[in-house]
Amino acid sequence: MMEDFEPVIIAFCCHYCAYTAADMAGSQRRCYPANVRIIRVPCSGKVDVIHILKAFENGADGVYVAGCLEGDCHFKNGNIRAARRVAYARKLMESVGIEGERLEMVNLSAGMGDRFAEIAGRITEKIRKMGPNPIRNTIRPVA
Amino acid sequence: MITAERKPLEEIIEYIRPFQKILLIGCNECVTVCSAGGRKEVGVLSSLLQMSFLKQGKNLQIREHTLERQCDPEYVEELVSMVDGVDAILSMACGCGVQEICRRFKNKPVFPAVNTKFMGASERQGVWAERCQGCGNCLLGVTGGICPIARCSKQLMNGPCGGSTSGKCEISPDVDCAWQLIWDRLKALGMEDRYEEIIPAKDWRPGRAAGPRKIIREDLAE
């Protein structure tokens, strides 16, 4: 069963760095797992706790928020705020019995296509080892 | 504003465990400003409860709604059409809001999802501090605009006490000595003579000491 498990991973990517890095990964013909579904946001600071929780509630197995490198946020400190929200959301997830490790904050610049692919691969493998989101079987499967 | 904090999730879960359909209501006033029970917090709590019960194999039905104000009957009336189909109501408003919901919907169990804390002000993003205890007879005019009742740990009318050190209260280095603040401000305003006036023992009856309070404006009351 676990061998067949293909995790669904949601990546909230900021428009200015992480999303551009994903684009760069494509231009560089770098492969990364198809498990990762990218949601482009204007800034990682736009991502709220509710967006993260809703992803898990709807069956995502892993979520990561990808913002600019610290100090390089296009909106000054959106990525710092995002990191604090991610830390808070991890605690909330733990409180309902969903492992906080399923959620991560990562930082990368627009030119880091390699790093984008590496992060996508690393997080997919980590979640694959952890197994499905504990509530996945009791809800309608995500598309 | 009236400040509040969300109750521990385990406590809320125990309240609603026997029920299947829940109406979760927030309030757009004070609890929205202090990030305890507004629309956003309603969404977060709803999601957490949903996941917690899903993990135990139970599919809870939660309807979310946030009222303009939960402590006013006009707004609470909005809930009439939603209440019939639910087993229980969970309110993220302050204690006033929760009780207004109870008064209106006598046949539904109503539970609080936040702990109401104090009347306070926002010190900075994400930090709220107590500023008023509703004593019913405001002293701010004689204490330089700083309240010794809400901000002095001993509620001294004439301070500071011997526990004031370098402007901090003996209970914690994080707590300012209210009387040091009062003195500093009177001095800055050139009103040191106010400090010389002895404030007599306070009559606490206008506060909570004379029982539950009520305000009646005869020109408005029907």
Image (cartoon, rainbow, N blue to C red):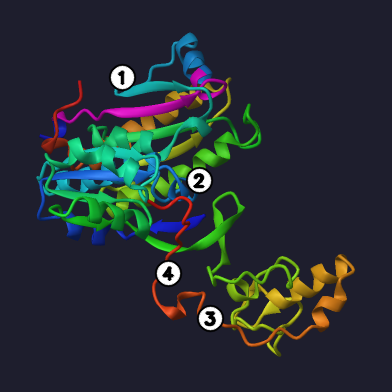
Q: Is residue A15 magenta?
A: yes
Q: Nearer the viewer, mark 1 or mark 3?
A: 3
The span picked out in magenta is: A4-19
- Badge 2, how many Cα within 10 Å: few under 14, some, many 20+? few
Chain bearing tag 3 is B
Amino acid bearing label 4: Arg
The residue identified by callout 2 is A84
Q: Nearer the viewer, mark 4 or mark 2?
A: 4
For the residue pair B14 and A44, the one nearer the viewer reads as: B14
Q: Please determine whether, in this image, residue B54 is positioned above or below residue A5.
A: below
The residue identified by callout 1 is A34
- Badge 1, how many Cα within 10 Å: few under 14, some, many 20+? few
Chain bearing tag 2 is A
Judge left or right: residue A80 versus residue B57. right
Q: Please determine whether, in this image, residue B110 is positioned above or below residue B55.
A: below
**Marks 1 and 3 share the same chain:** no
The residue identified by callout 4 is B213
Judge left or right: residue A119 versus residue B174. left
Please, what secondary structure does the residue beneath circle 4 have?
Answer: loop
Chain bearing tag 1 is A
At a point 50% along the width and 46% down the height, the residue shown is A84
The mark nearer the N terminus, 4 or 3, is 3
